[in-house]
Every structure is written in C-alpha cells, then in structure tokens.
Image: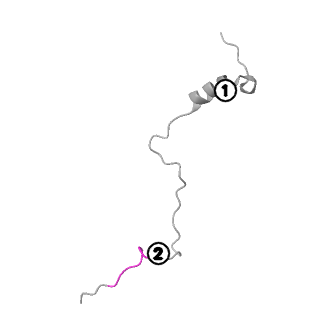
C-alpha cells in the first residue's frame, strides 16, 4: 500500500500527474463569460423599422 504524502511535499512531476488526473474536459462549453445586453443600450439591430407599405 502506498503511503499518502501531502501534495505540497511531493515532487513537481508528481504534482503535475495529480493535477492531470483531476483535470477534466469542457466538452464543448465555451469558458467565456456570457453577458445579457442591457435594454437601455442603443442597438440598431433591435430597433423596429417602419414599414413603407400602406
């Protein structure tokens, strides 16, 4: 049975190996913060254009 050695006392390569085991994948999730745009802000795309047909 392996003795448990605290992570801060392990070698650099052992720490890297431990971190690699803990690390997962994002599976297509983009880690960019998603922000909802304010309704008060001016946006040409949001403006309704008046129809020219009568």
Check disc 2 and report the residue beneath it: 43
Residue 21 location, x and y as percent? 57, 27
Residue at mark 2 to residue at mark 1: CA–CA distance: 49 Å
- Which quadrant holds the N terminus? top right
Q: Please determine whether, in this image, residue 21 is positioned above or below residue 27.
A: above
Outermost bottom residue: 54
Q: Mark on residue 44?
A: none
Q: Does the magenta stretch include residue 21?
A: no
| Residue at image location 44% in from the left, 43% down from the top | 28
Residue 26 location, x and y as percent? 49, 40
Q: Judge by depth and name the residue closer to the eye, 13 or 33.
A: 13
Q: Are marks 2 and 1 in contact (CB under 8 Å)?
A: no
Q: Judge by depth and name the residue closer to the eye, 12 or 31.
A: 12
Q: Please determine whether, in this image, residue 8 is positioned above or below residue 42.
A: above
Q: Mark on residue 15?
A: 1
SS of the residue under disc 1: helix
| Residue at image location 70% in from the left, 14% down from the top | 3
What residue range appears in magenta? Answer: 43-50
Residue 7 horizontal side relative to residue 28, left or right: right
């Amino acid at each position: 049975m392996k003795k448990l050695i605290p992570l801060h006392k392990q070698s650099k390569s052992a720490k890297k190996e431990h971190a690699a085991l803990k690390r997962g994948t994002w599976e297509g999730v983009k880690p960019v913060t998603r922000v909802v745009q304010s309704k008060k802000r001016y946006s040409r795309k949001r403006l309704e254009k008046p129809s020219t047909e009568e």
